[in-house]
């Protein structure tokens, strides 16, 4: 019942917004909402990436990682 917004409901909402805010403020409000949504998406994707990095880092064996680092350090010394 309340889950679907059809074209008539959307038009009604836009007309009410136009009456309340006026034609000059409506583009500014739309731009502000667009910027807020863009920032939210950017930050939520950043949080998702951080969580994936933390989970993948927790799943790796620390002994293997330290061995990889030690191996790369010895290779650097051989080159020098």
Image: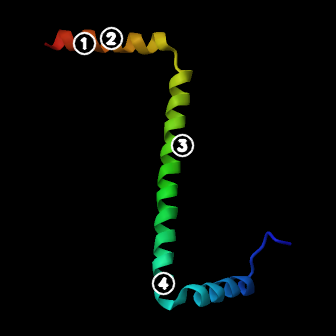
Q: Residue furthest front?
A: 20
Quadrant in the picture for the C terminus: top left
Do the residues under discs 2 and 4 have CB atoms within 8 angstroms?
Answer: no
Of pointers 1 and 3, the one earlier in the residue sequence:
3
| Residue to which mark 3 is pinned | 48
Mark 4 → mark 1, Cα distance in angstroms:
64 Å
Q: Quadrant of residue 70?
A: top left
Label 4 packing within 10 angstroms: few (<14), some (14-19), many (20+): few
Query: Any mark on residue 75, and which?
Result: 1
Decide if residue 23 is on the left or right side of residue 16. Answer: left
Q: Residue at x 46, y 88 (%)?
A: 24
Residues under numbered marks 1 and 3 in contact, where contact means CB atoms less than 8 Å apart: no
Q: Helix or strand or loop: what does disc 1 sit on?
A: helix
> Residue 45, image x and y in percent?
51, 48
Q: Name the element at disc 2.
A: helix
| Residue that label 4 marks | 25
Which of pointers 1 and 3 indicates the residue nearer the eye?
Answer: 3
Contact between marks 1 and 2 (CB within 8 A): the answer is yes
Residue 71, disc: 2
Q: Name which residue lies at 51% across and 56% down.
A: 40
* Pointer 4 or 3: first along the chain: 4
Image quadrant assignment for residue 48: top right
């Amino acid at each position: 019942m309340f889950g679907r917004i059809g074209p008539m409901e959307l038009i009604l909402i836009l007309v009410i917004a136009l009456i309340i805010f006026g034609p000059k403020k409506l583009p500014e409000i739309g731009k502000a909402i667009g910027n807020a949504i863009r920032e939210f998406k950017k930050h939520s994707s950043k949080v998702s990436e951080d969580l994936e990095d933390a989970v993948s880092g927790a799943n790796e064996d620390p002994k293997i990682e330290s061995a990889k680092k030690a191996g790369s350090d010895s290779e650097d010394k051989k080159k020098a």
